[in-house]
Image: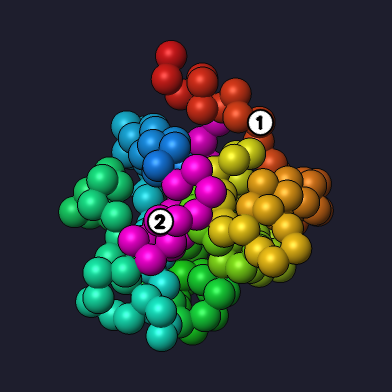
Amino acid sequence: MLKDVLVVIDVQYGLQKAYHFDQLVGAINQRIAAYHQAHHPVIFVQHNDDTMIYDNHDWQLVANLQRQANDRVILKYHSDPFFQTGLAAVLHDFGANTVEVCGLQTEYCIDSSLRVGHDLGFQMAIIQGLDSTLDAPDLTAQQIIKHHEHIWAGTFAEVLPKTVLEADSQ
């Protein structure tokens, strides 16, 4: 159940304290492998700000991501991966109509990517649990994830069941 392109967002050392980070990276690697095997493009989006400063350790994509030399890396300076990054143009260059997103943080960059991508005419998708975040003062990470996945479903994105991952491994 692959889309035209996989976009992996902000899987960086600066966010490694996010809820179930290691399991998230493992599941994302599973999706990356499926896209590579099918010769579908994989794009990595890397966040830059005052907490994840360019070329600093926290800014680096985690080393165990299954990134290949021909995968695109797009730098962003805002929670919206489409804002002044050229991401939409890259997706159009790949001929993408459908886009799967995964990564961090649920309520910021993942939410923005799904909403803005939808508004730009892409059919957006995410697999349940392939996004994560940190606990907030009033909500746990799990509550934030569940809430956002509920809002996205059928509105801004297709929220695919976790069983998609199981199908990949067979």
Q: What secondary structure is found at the residue carrying circle 2? A: loop
User: Residue at coordinates 37% horizontally, 76% vertically from top-left?
Assistant: 52
- The kind of residue tagged 1 is Pro
- Mark found first going from the N terminus, 1 or 2: 2
Q: Residues within 10 Å of mark 1 (few under 14, many from 20)?
A: few
**Image location of residue 155, percent across then percent down:** 81, 53
Q: Which is more toward the observer, 25 or 137?
A: 137
Quarter that holds the N terminus: top right
- The kind of residue tagged 2 is Gln
Determine the CA span between mark 1 and mark 2: 24 Å
Q: Which residue is mark 2?
A: 16
Taking the image as shown, residue 119 lies to the left or right of residue 7, namely right
**In the image, is residue 17 part of the stretch drawn in magenta?**
yes
User: Residue at coordinates 55% horizontally, 75% vertically from top-left?
Assistant: 79
Q: Is residue 79 above or below residue 141?
A: below
- Tell me if I can see residue 44 in this picture: yes
What label does residue 161 carry, if any? 1
**In the image, is residue 100 part of the stretch drawn in magenta?**
no
Per the rendered image, the range of residues in magenta is 1-21
Quarter that holds the C terminus: top left
**Image location of residue 142, percent across then percent down:** 67, 47
